[in-house]
């Protein structure tokens, strides 16, 4: 099970991950405990596979391309 900081940019793309505020020590401990005590189920693996697919498709090149496209939309033509 993936435990991910809610401040990580990838958190938006990985709703299946357990998200945690890393500054909340008690919350982090509870989330880590939840992650290691989750029962082994078949539906846990597809969730992780879905996260991996989103990571593969949302790499730095995708981020750069979408950022430049957004800038082009708001940059006045010269």
Image (tube, grey):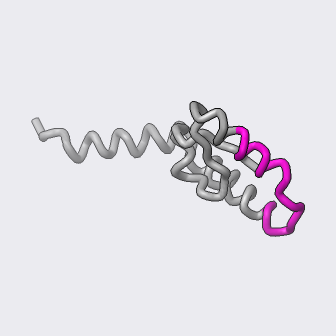
Is 74 left, or right, of 14 in this rendering?
left
Residue at (65, 33) in percent of width and height? 25
Which residue is farthest front? 26
How many marks do you count on the picture? 0
What is the x, y in percent for residue 16? 65, 58
Q: Residue at x 74, y 56 (%)?
A: 48
Residue drawn where x is 75% and y is 43% of the image: 32
Judged left or right of residue 15, residue 66 is left
| Horizontal relation, residue 38 to residue 51: left or right | right
Q: Quadrant of residue 53?
A: bottom right
Which residue is drawn at the image coordinates 59% and 35% (left, top)?
Answer: 24
The percent position of residue 22, horizontal first and vertical second, equals 60, 34
Residue 34 versus residue 45 in the image, above or below: above
51 relative to 23, above or below: below
Residue in the foreground of this view, choosing between 38 and 27: 27
Residue sticking out furthest to the right: 40
Closest to the observer: 22 or 47?
22
Which of these two is toward me, 48 or 4? 4
Q: Position of residue 4 (x, y in %)?
A: 64, 42
- Over which residues does the magenta segment extend? 29-45
Magenta stretch containing residue 70, yes or no? no
**41 to the left or right of 34:** right
Q: Quadrant of the C terminus?
A: top left
The extreme left residue here reads 78
Report the front residue among 29 and 67.
29
Magenta part, dominant SS: helix
Q: Residue 19, image x and y in percent?
A: 62, 47
């Amino acid at each position: 099970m993936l435990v991910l900081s809610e401040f990580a940019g990838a958190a938006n793309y990985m709703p299946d991950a357990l998200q945690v505020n890393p500054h909340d020590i008690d919350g982090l401990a509870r989330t880590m405990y939840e992650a290691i005590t989750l029962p082994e189920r078949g539906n846990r693996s597809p969730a992780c596979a879905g996260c991996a697919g989103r990571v593969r498709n949302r790499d730095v090149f995708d981020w750069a391309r979408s950022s430049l496209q957004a800038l082009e939309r708001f940059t006045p033509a010269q």
